[in-house]
Image (cartoon, rainbow, N blue to C red):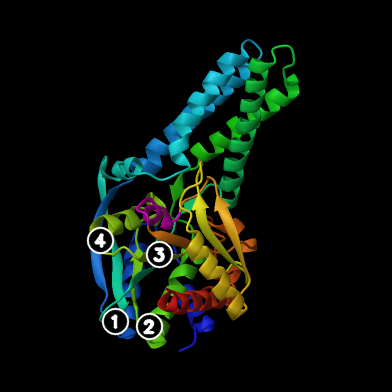
Amino acid sequence: MSFDAERAHREMQALAFPRRSGSPGAEQARAYLLARLHEAGLTPVLEPFTFSGRLVERIVPAVVLAVAGLVLAATLAYFVSPAGSLALLLLGFLAGLPATRWSYRVERLLDSGELRQSANIVATLTDPPHPRRHVLLMAHSDSKSQRLPIAVRTGAALGALGGGGLLLLGALWGVLRPGGPLPAGVVVGAGLISTLGLGVLALNPSGNASPGALDNAAGVGVLLELARAVPALGLQQTRVTLVITGAEEEGLAGAVRFFQAHEGRLGPEAVLINLDSPGAAPEVTLLSVFGLPPMGAAPDLVRLARAAARTAGIPVRTLWLPAGAGTDHFPAALRGIAAVTLASLGPAFRRIHTPLDTPAGVLPEGLGNAGRLVLALLRALDTEE
């Protein structure tokens, strides 16, 4: 069976309504997804879980504001003591570093505070007698809105990192070469850019006003069409499990709970292919590496994906995400699972987390390329030694 991009696009359209975790929209989406999977001849299992919103709503903003204060203090201290400025910047870097990466310590914060309810949907697509590899196909079903879209948040994160990095180099230069400090305009500019970027990241509350077409009805639409297409591939050595997570926008809670519940049962050859915001462009973006210092690299999986894309004539690019956003493959990479997210970068990407994230911005061609790439990658994984 080939991948039907138009049908995936229709599934995306049917899911494009506000559905933040815990809202009536989230329940409506879950009921729709269960019905669609049953219609595809599958037996989906609902896996409820609890999580705390404290990580996203309180802890992360508080830490980011504290780091912004340290950067501003370091900017002012530079003209009095470059060494003092350097010490403040290093403290801010150490405090903010966990926000760029993923860790078990971060995951434990999902248990802290008042607990909320959500659920994952899990279904087996293929289960040969003696599987050599277990591939998880994942996408999150929830949406959210924010005062600023994800593109602005990413820009703010890069500004915070770039300005802070320049200020750090200036402070180090001032310590090593006391007679040759950076010009005052450069120091103040770098410090203010970094402080402003951090302030933007911290003061960006969430709501339920986005239809979430690209993020991530598009990914779920691709997943629903894969639920029909994958069983027809005739895979001989690969077990394939479909996972639709809840509460991704609330600190990747659904993916964390899935891996906590299934850890030890996925097998040593587990692979995750995550679909998050495909369809903004015909080109498929492969996201594997993230954080500072970089983590989550799956070079063999990315190499195989690029080779499969070349064979299928699908345009692809790779992306490293240093900070500013998160996706469900982070908890998998933390556990040593080879993981990649199929995403896209296009005009609609700027509208993520806003009321303008509507189906008009999602291209059927982009969904088709993402789906065809997953099928090609599954075939390659099934035959690769």
Residue at which label 4 appears: 262
Tag 3 secondary structure? strand
- Relative to 280, is 137 on the left or the right? left
Residue at which label 2 appears: 235
Q: Quadrant of residue 384?
A: bottom left
Which mark is nearer the camera, 2 or 3? Answer: 2
CA gap between label 3 and label 4 equals 13 Å
Residue at which label 3 appears: 272
Is residue 330 highlighted in magenta?
A: yes
Marks 2 and 1: CB-CB under 8 Å?
Answer: yes
Tag 1 secondary structure? loop
Residue at the image position 52 percent from the left and 40 percent from the top: 201
- Relative to 276, is 57 on the left or the right? left
Residue at the image position 58 percent from the left and 23 percent from the top: 72
In this view, which residue lies farthest toward the front?
A: 385
Q: Amino acid at mark 1?
A: Pro
Residue at which label 1 appears: 128
Residue 171 is situated, as x and y percent measured from the top left of the image, at: 63, 21
Which mark is nearer the camera, 1 or 3? Answer: 1
Tag 4 secondary structure? helix
Residue 240 is situated, as x and y percent measured from the top left of the image, at: 34, 74
Q: Amino acid at mark 4?
A: His
Which mark is nearer the camera, 4 or 1? Answer: 1
Q: Amino acid at mark 3?
A: Leu
Residue at the image position 53 percent from the left and 81 percent from the top: 5
Quadrant housing the C terminus: bottom left
CA gap between label 2 and label 4 equals 23 Å
The residues colored magenta run 327-336
